[in-house]
Image: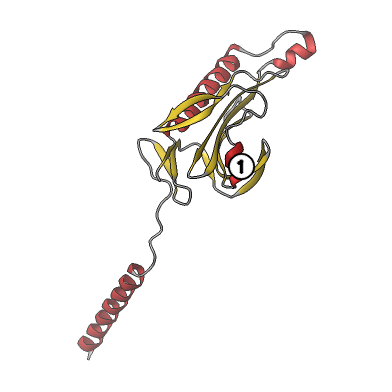
Amino acid sequence: MKKQEALSIIFAFVILGAGSILYLSGQPSIPAEEVARGGWNVYKNTQFGFEFRYPSNYRLNTNVEKEFFYNYELTKIAELSAEETYLDAATFSVSIDNAPSGSGACLKKEYGERLLPKDLNGATWYGAKQGDAAMGGARGEIGEYRTVHADSCFVIRSELYWHLVGYGGYIQNGKNDATPEEVAGQRNAIEKHSAALEGILSSFRFTE
């Protein structure tokens, strides 16, 4: 009797296990959007047909967000951001406008800026990286590139902002009061994230 009970229990576990395997195998597989590769992750957007790599210390946000640039509305579809001592912000974003009027105005010089061609993995983008956007103790580097792909206007934007360490000393007594360690720390942070943002940009490519 005990032997029959033991066999029944084993049989029940086998049935449950087989059922679990069949249940799991029947579930739709969820493709991973972030794939670790060489210390960087890969973000793939199958809806709009593009991908880029990014460091693991950057947070990815794919919540759709409406915003306005130039004379038309864009939808921000992916944004990266990182936090770092001595920096205010380090961000990279991809936006799109698939309206016919938007794609037609995509490459226009709305503010008189000089648009320079830049090749990104076989696609020609137009834009420029602005230098030090100085305003008092605030500093920044902004890069913006645009292209028309599949009848849609794509806009890539990278932004790096910081406040000069020790700038409060200028206001108080006309002298920077930052320590050499703070100055070196901020310089290293700027160089690190400037290189990271350039690396993210260089990795962007259309997959369709």
**Residue 119 occupies quadrant:** top left
Relative to residue 85, is residue 154 depicted above or below? below
Colouring used for the render = secondary structure
Tell me the kind of residue under disc 1: Gly
Which x, y percent locates residue 169?
74, 13
Residue farthest along the bottom direction in this orientation: 1
Q: Residue 128: horizontal and vertical position, in percent?
A: 55, 24
Please state if 17 lies on the left or on the right of 77 as rendered: left
Residue, far right: 172
Picture residue at 38% right of the left edge, 35% below the top: 39
Residue under the point 47% across and 52% down: 47
- Image coords of residue 61 (percent x, y): 55, 45
Regarding residue 33, the answer to whether it shows in the image is yes
The answer, for residue 75, to whether it is visible in the render is no
Nearest to the observer: residue 42 or residue 4: 42
Left or right? Give the position of 144 relative to 45: right
Q: In the image, residue 192 lies at what x, y percent?
A: 49, 24
Viewer-nearest residue: 146 or 201 = 146
Q: Which residue is mark 1?
A: 102
Q: Secondary structure at mark 1?
A: helix
In the image, is 170 to the left or to the right of 17? right
